[in-house]
Amino acid sequence: MRLSRRALIKDGLLVVSAGMVMPAIFSRGVASARAMSLEGSRFAQAASERTLIVVQMAGGNDGLNTVIPFTDPLYHQMRPTLAIPDAQVLMLDTRLGLHPSLKALQPLWEQGHLAIVEGVGYPNQSLSHFQAMDIWQTLDLSGNGTEGWLGKLVSGWVDQDGHPFKALDVGVQTAQALQSISTPVPTVASVNAYRVYPDPADRDASNARMQALMKLYSSYPKTSPYAALLDTTALNAQDGSSQLLQADATYKPAVTYPTGAFAEGLKILAEAIVQGLGLRVGYVTLGGFDTHANQQATHAALMQTLAEGLSAFYNDLDAHGKADNVVVMTWSEFGRRVEENGSLGTDHGTAAPMFVLGKPINKGIYGEPPSLSSLDSNGNLKYTVDFRSVYATVLDRWLGASSKDVLGGSYGSQNFLPQP
Amino acid sequence: MSINDDDLYNQPTEPRRKLDATGRSVGASGMGNTGGMGAVPVGAGSARPGPRPQATPTGPVSGQVIPPTPAPASRPQQGQKQGRQAMSRRRLLGASLLGIAGLGTIGVAGGLALNWAEKDGFASLFHTAASNAQTGHLLRRAGFGASPADMQTYKSLGFEGAVDRLLNYQQVSDDALESRLKALNLNLNRPVDQQRWWLLRMAWTQRPLLEKMTLFWHGVLTSSFRKVGGKNFFMRMINQNQFLRAHAFDTFDNILLGITADPAMLFYLDLTKSRKNHPNENYARELMELFTLGLGHYTQQDVSEGAAALTGWHVDGLTSRYIPADHNNLVKHYLGQTGNFDYRDVVRILTNHPATPWFLARKLFTFFVYENPSTDDLKPLVDSYVESGHNIGAVMRTLLLSPQFSSQKAYRARIKSPTEFVVGAYRALELQGSGLALPTMTTLMGQALFDPPNVAGWPGDKVSALWLNSGTWMTRLNYIDLLLVRGGATGREQAQPLDLQSVVNANRIDSPEKFVDYYASFLLDGMLDSDRRSLLVDYFSTPDVSRGGGQITLTSGKSYPLNRVRGTLYLMMASPEYQLN
């Protein structure tokens, strides 16, 4: 299907074989590919084999217990019950170490495939989950943005190859980072649910029924409510499901993934990469980080889920010879308060570390861990690295997109990826 | 996250809960959603059927010092007199219309063939044959859509009469529903049974607005079973749900006092863990940000001072207790006021804060009418809130009778939520099954009840377009298939296809056009453009090359292949129009 689809596109015209539903989105895609290459679009230059996987840690991850300043006496002082004992810390250098449940990431560090960006935040950080998530995803510091930074990126990319999987979100709801007005992103909860089932009474496996349905969608008056969304969603689904199912039929993971939704989600992304669906941006979310009370066990479990999932994902890609093509970046809307609260937990905080991992990465710790002795008026960390400089780095140095255009400004860069 | 069987109908019938490597259980929604803020995963699926709780718990349980226990939701009385006068006129009109467009006799779709975009909204249709649109719209927003019987009942009341019936729900018996739910012997300490219990309640209730309102509150004053104290206490979610139902139209003060004292909420936002000398900020912050004021109306100092004022709560089994000795007695500076405040003062200050009615009105208007309301849209709701002493029933009456509610702008202005879609289709087709498949379906569509993605509830409640993506769209289609092909039964159950022959016979459907019109009359308000109607009729009438899948015989005596007849109904429910609310 993938190949034949490409072969069908000739001179911007789509030849559709009998019985096939007319995928209007592709004719539009081709038209816009033309227009954009005429304009010399900056997006069109993007390298085609490279993929960015974004992992959202929803709820506000406790950065201080993730990448631990274990030699700082203030850390132990302000966290009498929650500080990780020195003996358990997985040391990275003389001042920082990983949470013990991140053990599965240690080999990646040792092999040189893990980078940590310390102290990431932005000016006047919001302690609201939702405003902070809005800001991280839309880059509008007022928290009123609607278009996601990744949505803006992928909708700017042209669809020369007829691949619907430029971006793929695992889950039941498209992340705000991937929202764009023009390009709904395929959102997959599970491969098996990502298809339309036929009526057993239909002798043609519901082909005629699907054709009639697509006619109802394409003829739905364009001025009607949600017309564009409905139309593109239906087309997107119709085409994407057959590609994904075909890919799924021959994909064999090279490792055993941990059970659980997070690792299952990473497996779907690995499948899309290994099977060459054209994935450029993948997105998956791990939730549950809002540890206001009884943090220790919850946070340890989350660290383990994160590390073991990412490790399996990396090893799977590596075994398939794809590890050179993939960079993973994690983020969370904020870190947590330096001082623990009275409920064995931590309240909302500010700056926190991000992980960037993959074979193309320059191992190391970037940015500066915020000082524990110079906190803001709420007892929170002062950020040292603007999150947009991390985004800019993956855009400019990895995806070959212009960060200035996507982010709407210049925010510098970090050196965890080499200059192209 | 994978569904192992190839066949949809063999899908596991409950949200898949697996233990991951860390021994946490992870649900189908546990990842795709933005992740419960406080969603500490608990042994969700492993909940053993404990002692069977009563099928219909008796309302909220909240300790000894429960805030002024509100009387059963006060009935909105305002405006009833005028309403009644106006109603009789419309009732008369409605009755005359029944003769022309009565349900079960002939459909109205083809005859009207309206392109809504060309009309100027309800105003022009109010006194004409559009009362299917009016009634359908009302029932979709203030309920879960119309079955043929609903359409008949509510249409005959006229619009204001219908609004009265919805608001004065105590006057409508729901005994049949209660006994049917009881007969299912659900284990209400089990999340998946909790979801069935509520989804079937919504599908079968004769008090649709009460359930819709409860759903609204569940999306605002929300909690998740994943963090209410562990698997032995999942029942706290049902108790919270019963509280929200019992007080759905009460004063906002009583609702906030009750939810503050609610055991599930006390766990979900950690108030039960808050100590007088070390207050926990979680509830204090979200109470202002998400329940009453919204961002920009408070400072971090208000959060910490509010947290101190709210201390003193404990949970004891299924009840809660306020212990004054555990309350922080220092003087607090909270939202510009100063005093030794406690939770009652916090609620009083918040419900009387000028930002609150606007915040609440925006939530209600967005959920029930359309998104991005203007100040003018919200003003009457705000006035009702203030004039009625914060009575939600009064605000809802104002909302439902507002010109905005019945405007063209509101018509089909939201994407159906998963609950609206799943329940609406079940209700419209008058299915009577076990509801075993419903939790999986709503979860895969993006809404697992009692398990919101985070403390802000479902983003789709605010921006309904977020409900729709390629994955959820296909699940919607597959759900329709499941209803038609298997009568909604899962792979575990004996399946019975939807009995279309009986529908044809009972409604004397004698042509493909009649079939389309019949279903369009209550599924699509009879609002079907003539081109689109033709497309459906063509599909119905096109003979298949190969046959053998059964037949449906119309009352004219002419037979059509089952797949074509069933497929036509599928197309109507899979159509763009049907995705809208």
Image: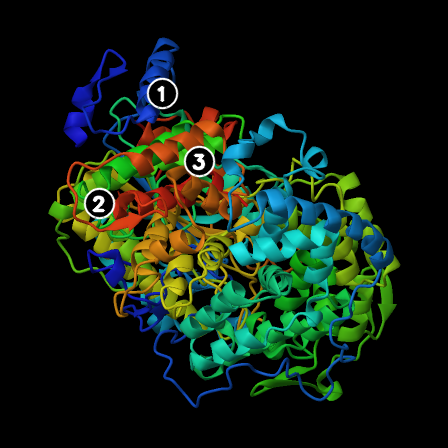
Horizontal arrangement in the rendering, residue B52 relative to residue B564 (left or right): right
For the rendered model, the colour scheme is rainbow
Residue A270 locus on image (x, y percent): 23, 47
Picture quadrant where residue A150 is located: top left
Q: Quadrant of the N terminus of chain B?
A: bottom left
Image: A367 above or below A154 = below
- For badge 2, the amino acid type reads Asp
Residue drawn at x 79%, y 74% as measured from the top left: B344
Q: Quadrant of residue B448?
A: bottom left
- Position of A395 with respect to B160 (left or right) is left
Disc on the earlier residue, 3 or 2: 2
Query: Callout 3 environment at 10 Å: few (<14), some (14 to 19), or many (20+)?
Result: many
- Check disc 1: other Cα within 10 Å, few if <14, some if 14-19, many if 20+: some
Dot 2, how many residues are within 10 Å of its Cα: few (below 14), some (14-19), or many (20+)? Answer: many
Residue A28: mark in rendering = 1
Q: Chain of mark 2?
A: A
Label 2: which secondary element: loop
Mark in front: 2 vs 1:
2
Foreground label between 3 and 1:
3
Give the CA distance from mark 3 to mark 1.
16 Å
Q: Is any part of residue A284 visible from this angle? A: yes
Q: Do pointers 3 and 2 mark residues of a single chain?
A: yes
Identify residue for label 2: A202
The answer for how far apart the CA atoms under marks 2 and 1 are is 31 Å
The furthest residue to the top: A38
Between discs 2 and 1, the one toward the N terminus: 1
